[in-house]
Amino acid sequence: MDDPTDTGFAQQCAETTKKIGILTGFTAVLIIIFMFSPVSNLLVAASLGKVVIIALLMYIIYVNVLQTVFCQQVFNVNFYEVDLNQAKLNTIGGHIFTMALIVLLYSVASNLFSPLFGGSSQQGSEMPYSSNPSGYNQ
């Protein structure tokens, strides 16, 4: 490989990170629109929006893993050395960000599929009033 201090490799890592940041921000806006706004009450629109969010999150995870591994190889990051340099911290941050995206992906997917598998929905999840105030079966 060429010298990792070459601006070409650093520029490529920076551009990919910028693209990941823009896509993550766009996905966050979609999550707010389709999961926390009144649009979430519309079944078809909310389901379609969640499918788009899941697809975007999967793409972001894919690109982030590729970018993290590429930068790790280019800058020759070795986790067995004690020193903490910027490339090692960026690699660790990339892996932590990937784990956070996986948790977010799981959350959106479980929210999408919970009505299908008998999970509680956002509306009407309160306990209904019983006719027996003591709560004991007779």
Image (cartoon, helix red, strand yellow):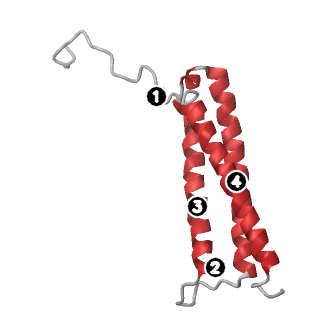
Seen from the viewer's position, the closer of residues 29 and 123 is: 29
Question: Which of label 3 and label 2 is nearer to you?
Answer: 2
- Whichever of callouts 4 and 3 sits on the residue coming sooner in the sequence is 4
Seen from the viewer's position, the closer of residues 113 and 88 is: 88
- Whichever of callouts 3 and 2 sits on the residue coming sooner in the sequence is 2
Question: Which of label 1 and label 4 is nearer to you?
Answer: 4
- Whichever of callouts 1 and 3 sits on the residue coming sooner in the sequence is 3
Helix, strand or loop status at disc 2: helix
- Residue of label 4: 60
Crowd class of label 1 (few under 14; some 14 to 19; many from 20; radius 10 Å): few
Q: Is residue 50 left or right of residue 4?
A: left
Which amino acid does the dot numbered 3 rest on? Phe
- Residue of label 1: 120
| Residue at mark 1 to residue at mark 2: CA–CA distance | 44 Å
Which amino acid does the dot numbered 2 rest on? Ala
Residue 27: image quadrant is top right
Crowd class of label 3 (few under 14; some 14 to 19; many from 20; radius 10 Å): some
- Whichever of callouts 1 and 2 sits on the residue coming sooner in the sequence is 2
- Residue of label 3: 97
**Rendering coords of residue 51 (x, y %):** 69, 36
- Whichever of callouts 2 and 4 sits on the residue coming sooner in the sequence is 4
